[in-house]
Amino acid sequence: MGLLSKKDTKLITDPLADNNPITIQVLGICSALAITAELEASIVMSISVLFVMGVGNVVISLMRNIIPSKIRIIAQLIVVATLVIIVDLVLKAFAYELSKTLSVFVGLIITNCIIMGRFEAFALGNGPWRSFLDGIGNALGYAVILIIVGFFRELLGSGTLLGIPVLGDPIEKTGLYSIGYENNGFMLLSPMALIVVGIIIWVQRSRNKALIED
Amino acid sequence: MEKRTDKNSYTIIFAIGMVLVVGSLLAFLASSLKPRISENQRLEKQQNILYAMGINDNDETSAVFISTDKAPEAFTENVADQIVITVDANGKVVKRQTRDEYFEETNQEPYLIDVKKQQASAKDGGERKLPLFVGKNADGKTVYVAPIYGKGLWDAIWGYVAMDENMVVQGAYFDHKGETPGLGANIKQRYFMDDFYGEHLLTENGAFKGITVAKGNADPKNNDKKDNEVDAIAGATITGDGVSAMIKNDLKLYKPYFDNLKTK
C-alpha cells in the first residue's frame, strides 16, 4: 500500500475483527440493541457514525494540546454535539427529506459511547491523520456488527430484508409460510439483539483463542 | 512540572471560550438557515394534508409525497376551504370561521395552526382552534382532513386523518419526531397507515369511539372495518397506544361539526 504504512493499515483493519468496538471493546452496545430491528436503519446509522467518527476524531486530535484535561470529557461532548447539530441543521435546510430519515439518529449518535470512547482513547494522544484512520476503522467495525445483527433480526423477525419480503407473505401463507414457518416476533425486541451479539462474540472467540480473557 | 493546560485559570478561560465559539457558531447557523427550514416545514404540512387526501406519488409499497414544487398548486386546487372551529375548554363550539374570515382576523393560514399550542391552551382552560380542511380527494369524493397530535414513546407523534361525512376514514398520514427506527417509527409506513382506510370512527349507534391500535385483534388482514380497531406493530406498543390516544382525543372534538353536517 503506497498511501498507508503498515501501521496505518492496522488502524483500519484491526477494529474490523480482533479489536472490534462492539464485540471486543464493548462500546456502542446501546445503539446496536436499539436500532437493529431493520437492516435499513442499521445501514443509515452506520453511515452517520462513520461521518461523525471520522470528522470528530480529527477535530479532537487537532485540539488535543489545548484541551484542559480536567474538562476534556465535556469538551469532547460539545464537539460531537456541535457536529451533529450542524449536520442536522444543514440537512433540514437543503435536504429536508433526508433529514427526516436521519433525525431520529441524532440523539443516538450524541450518546454513542464508541465516539466518546475513541476520542478519549485515541484522538487525544495521536495526530489528525492517524486519528482519522482510527475513526474510520472503528466506525467500519461498528458497521459490520450492526449490519450482521440487523440482517438476522429483520430476516427472522419480519421475514423481509430492506423492507422487501424474501420468505413469502405471512398473511397469505405463501413461500416458506405455506409449510408452517412463522416469523419470530421476539427477534424484533432488543433482548434478541443482545443474544445475536453474544453469538457473534462466541463465534469470534472460538476462532481466535487469543481473545479469551482469563 | 505542571502543564500550562492544567491551571484552573486556563481551564476556565478555555471553557468560556469554547462555549462562546460554539454558541455563536450554532446561533449564526440556526438563524441564517431558519427561513429555508420554515419554508420546508410549511411545504411539508401541505404535503401531509394532500397525502391524507390521497393526493401523493405513492408507488407500490412506499409512501411518497407529491413533490414540493407541485404541492402549493395542488393544495390550492384540492383544498376548497380551511374551516376553523373554535371550541371552549369543554369542547363546546364557540364559533366557526371559513379560511377567509380566519385570515382576515389573524393574518395566518389555518393549516399553519400549531396543534400542540392549541392543546396546551385548552388544557389551561382556554379556547382551542380546530382546523379542518375540506376538499375533494383523488377519487373526487368530498373529504374532511383534521390534524392530530400526541405523544409516542420518546417524543411527539402527529398526523392527519381524512374522513367522509360519516366519519369513516378516507386516508391517514402519521409522523413522529423520534420513535425507535424499525419499531415505533413504522407508524409512517404504508402497511400501517393504509390499514386505517375505510375504518369507522363511530360505533353502529353513531357514538364516537375512535380507532384503537390493537394487539391480537384476530383480524390482521383488517377485513372488519367496523370494529374500530387496526392491527398493531410488533414491538411498538407504546407508540401504538399513542396513536390510539391522539385519534380519540383530537378527533372527538370534531364530532359536533359532523353531526351538524347531517342535520343540514
Image (spheres, coloured by chain):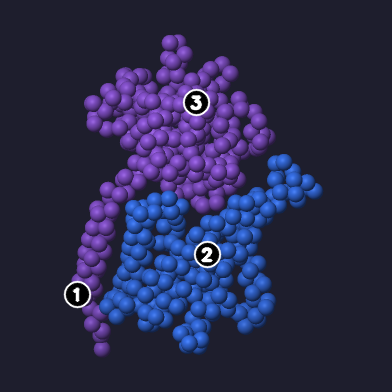
Chain colored blue: A
Compute the Cα span from label 3 to label 2: 51 Å
Circles 3 and 2: CB atoms closer than 8 Å: no
Examine the rendered structure and indicate whether residue A109 appears above or below residue B68. below
Residue type at the position of mark 3? Gly
Chain colored purple: B
SS assignment at label 2: helix
Of B261 and A85, nearer the camera is B261
- Circle 2 sits on which residue? A29
Q: Badge 1 sits on which subunit?
A: B
Of A100 and A200, nearer the camera is A100
Q: How far across and how far down the image is residue B237, in percent?
A: 55, 43
Q: Looking at this rendering, what residue extends furthest in the right direction?
A: A179
Compute the Cα span from label 1 to label 3: 72 Å
Counting residues from the start of the chain, the first of labels 1 and 3 encountered is: 1
- Circle 3 sits on which residue? B140
- Circle 1 sits on which residue? B9
Q: Badge 2 sits on which subunit?
A: A
What residue is shown at x 62% (from left), y 83% (from top)? A210
